[in-house]
Image (spheres, grey):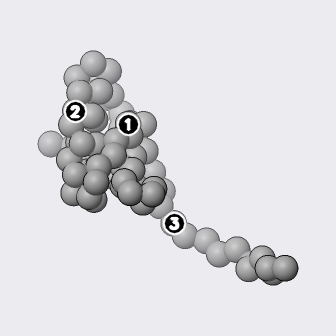
Amino acid sequence: MTTLTALIQKEKDMYVAKCPEVGTTSQGKTVEEAISNLKEATELYLEEFPKKDIRRPILTTFEVSEVAKT
């Protein structure tokens, strides 16, 4: 069993889920559905293109100054 990362972003009426380690993307109407679809897409991808060395991304936050609204 391998643990991977899911980055989820709301886009209009769908949730888009991305796996940065593998590069797969999927979507769903709920967060749970998006993750489930991403898991399936990633498993299918890895069956076809196995990866021996999966590197975890570095996840951090940063601040930017606020832009003045005119």
Residue tagged 1:
24
- Residue at the extreme left of the image, as rendered: 1
Q: Could you say where residue 19 lies in the image, as x and y percent from the top left?
A: 37, 45
Q: Secondary structure at mark 3?
A: loop
Q: Could you say where residue 65 lies in the image, as x and y percent from the top left?
A: 74, 78
Query: Which residue is located at x 29 percent, y 27 percent?
Result: 45
Query: Which residue is located at x 28 percent, y 35 percent?
Result: 42
Quarter of the image holding residue 9? bottom left
Residue type at mark 2: give it. Answer: Glu
Comparing labels 2 and 3, the label whose residue is closer to the camera: 2
Which of marks 1 and 2 precedes in the sequence?
Answer: 1
Please give left or right for residue 13 compared with residue 40 in the image.
right
Residue type at mark 3: give it. Answer: Thr
Q: Could you say where residue 37 lies in the image, as x and y percent from the top left?
A: 24, 42
Comparing labels 1 and 3, the label whose residue is closer to the camera: 1
Residue type at mark 1: give it. Answer: Thr
Q: Quadrant of the N terminus?
A: top left
- The foreground one among 5 and 70 is 70
Which of marks 3 and 1 precedes in the sequence?
Answer: 1
Please give left or right for residue 70 compared with residue 26 in the image.
right
> Count the marks: how many?
3
**Relative to 15, residue 61 above or below:** below
Q: Could you say where residue 4 lies in the image, as x and y percent from the top left?
A: 29, 48
Q: Which mark is residue 60?
A: 3
Give the CA distance from mark 1 to mark 3: 21 Å
Q: Secondary structure at mark 1?
A: strand
Residue tagged 2:
43
Query: Which residue is located at x 65 percent, y 75 percent?
Result: 63
Give the CA distance from mark 2 to mark 1: 10 Å
